[in-house]
Amino acid sequence: MFRVNENFLQLQSGYLFPEIGRRVQAFAAANPAADIIRMGIGDVTEPLPAKCIEAMHAAIDELGHRETFRGYGPEQGYAFLREAIAEHDYQARGANVAADEIFVSDGSKCDCGNILDILGPGNRIAVCDPVYPVYVDTNVMAGNTNGSIAAARYGGLIYLEMDESNGFDPPLPEQPVDVIYLCFPNNPTGTVASRESLQRWVDYARDHRSLILFDAAYEAYISDPDLPHSIFEIEGAREVAIEFRSFSKTAGFTGVRCAFTVVPRDLHVVTCGGERVSLHSLWYRRHTTKFNGASYPVQRGAAAIYTPEGRRQVRELISGYMQNATTIRQGLLAAGFRCYGGVHAPYVWLKTPDGLSSWDFFDQLLQKCQVVGTPGSGFGAAGEGYFRLSAFNSRQKTAEAVARIAAAYSAVG
Ligand code: MLT
């Protein structure tokens, strides 16, 4: 008889966003006239930058002629895109990242999960709490948790709580860890990490020979010039970190699909047998074996973001979402909510009123205001009592949602 990967049976619940979708669908079926405003999953709503559209059209036309047709591309991405990324996202900010250290893919969520292919068993893994659920669930699937669950936490993982008491700056682990997931600007709290805070993590990783898996999917939302956009802006990071980036939130590619992972050539590990192994070589082997490259028109669309006009259009797109974040943050603060994030990130993290649980507030907000958000407890035990609102929506719907919430909850204290 064949066997299945029984690690999947340890997963505590369905993935968070399908569960939200199920509840919203049930509400909509029972209330067909309700004008529901969705601020749950961080999915973009505005059209792609015109430069991307233009580049993708041109690429499709190329594919329509024998002379310019292309079949399989390089698995790790076309040079035109990797070079543009290296120059604009890294070298322009003083980060030493070369084009051949960049691996283009069809999404950061996939890359975050796939990276576990090149890590061995027995790693002590630290995640922040609250946390993007993909880091946790993929480790459960890979057998990196030990089957026990207590207080909504998996045995075998080390949880680093981020909350009001530590200013959402996760503490260094009390016990040594081998792999650390960090995400800044943070999903779900929308908070950011200073250069000093990231330096502390890089120093920790160098001292303990640990690996930092750094998710920078929201870096484009940073507006303070002193905040780092990449872990590779931090001294020593090339020896200890891998970075995930995505065009999803930067340029509205959630449906188009394009992302990349940076694996520096300086990153090595020593095997049990004493051999020094390059993670770049392992990831190259994995990527070229299991992936055939993001599609050519999509990569052309992504590269267009780095043209002067493309950059201007992306800034405009992001500024629109950040105006929404400001509307949410200011509106909720004025209504008496305690709010975090939303300044360098498209998420506002708020404390639920009256000590409501995250899911109770979710249901109440849906009933009272027909607004959908994301319950903080869906991101981990330390997210209980919090709630996330996403700024990915139109200006008009965001303002309407905030007005409804303010009317229903003013002076929640
Ligand atoms: C979120 O809402 O947390 C994100 O959209 C999820 C994702 O990027 O996969």
Image (cartoon, rainbow, N blue to C red):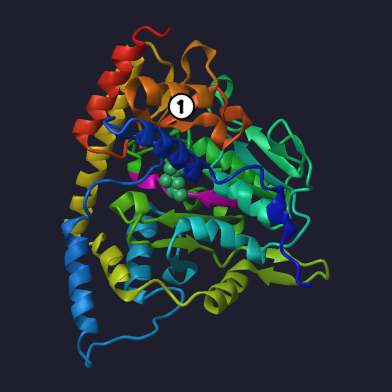
In the image, residue 399 sits, relative to residue 158, either above or below, namely above
Q: Nearer the viewer, residue 354 or 108?
A: 354
In the image, residue 64 sits, relative to residue 17, either above or below, namely below
Quadrant of residue 121 within the rendered picture: bottom right
Q: Residue at x 68, y 54 (%)?
A: 8
Q: Residue at x 52, y 36 (%)?
A: 196
Is residue 344 shown to the viewer in this render? Answer: no
Residue position for label 1: 362
Quadrant of residue 3 within the rendered picture: bottom right
Which residues, given as a range, are shown in magenta?
209-220
On the picture, is 46 further left or further right than 193?
left
Which residue of the protein is positioned furthest toward the right in this rendering? 273
Q: Residue at x 23, y 46 (%)?
A: 317
Image quarter (top left, top right, bottom left or bottom right) of the C terminus:
top left
Residue 27 part of the magenta segment: no
How far across and down, in percent of the image, does residue 344 sit? 36, 35
In the image, residue 404 sits, relative to residue 58, either above or below, namely above
How far across and down, in percent of the image, does residue 224 sit? 34, 36
Image quarter (top left, top right, bottom left or bottom right) of the N terminus:
bottom right
